[in-house]
Amino acid sequence: MPEIVATRRYLHQHPEIGLSEFETSNYVAAQLVAMGYEVTRGLAKTGVVATLCNGSSGRSIGIRADFDALPILEETGDEYQSR
């Protein structure tokens, strides 16, 4: 669980506007590779597709997520606020 919190805080601290999420894309891809996923890059500039094969059942699950940010100034005072 600490890894999930650290990842969420890192992503929150380093927001990037849509189609400019190059650092976010690199970070997400590296995390997925470290977890054993096969990663495909270069979709819509910053897209990441990850595949995890775990057997031969032929069943699959698809998950889709966005990670673009809005251009706002966050002033929460939290240590992980957007920079």
Image (cartoon, rainbow, N blue to C red):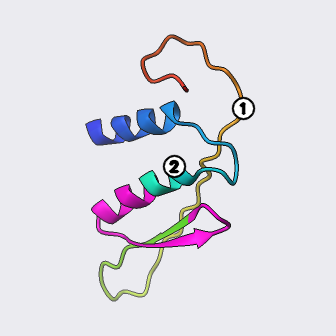
Residue 32: quadrant of the picture: bottom left
As drawn, 46 above or below 69:
below
Query: In the rendering, which numbered label is found on residue 59?
Result: none
Q: Is residue 22 magenta?
A: no
Residue 1 seen in render: no
Residue at 52% x, 70% y is 41
Q: Position of residue 9 (x, y in %)?
A: 43, 32
The one nearer the camera, 64 or 7, is 7
Locate the N terminus by quadrant. top left
Crowdedness near tag 2: few (<14), some (14–19) or many (≥20) residues, C-alpha within 10 Å: some
Residue at 29% x, 68% y is 36
Circle 1 sits on which residue? Answer: 71
- Span colored in magenta: 28-47
Q: Which is more N-terminal, label 2 or label 1?
A: 2
> With 79 as the anchor, is 76 left or right in this view?
right
> With 39 as the anchor, is 41 left or right in this view?
right
As drawn, 45 above or below 26:
below
Numbered disc 1: secondary structure: loop
Q: Amino acid at mark 2?
A: Thr
Numbered disc 2: secondary structure: helix
Crowdedness near tag 1: few (<14), some (14–19) or many (≥20) residues, C-alpha within 10 Å: few
Circle 2 sits on which residue? Answer: 24
Q: Position of residue 23 (x, y in %)?
A: 51, 49
The one nearer the camera, 30 or 8, is 30
Q: Amino acid at mark 1?
A: Pro
Residue at 30% x, 78% y is 54
Q: Position of residue 28 (x, y in %)?
A: 45, 54
Locate the C terminus by quadrant. top right
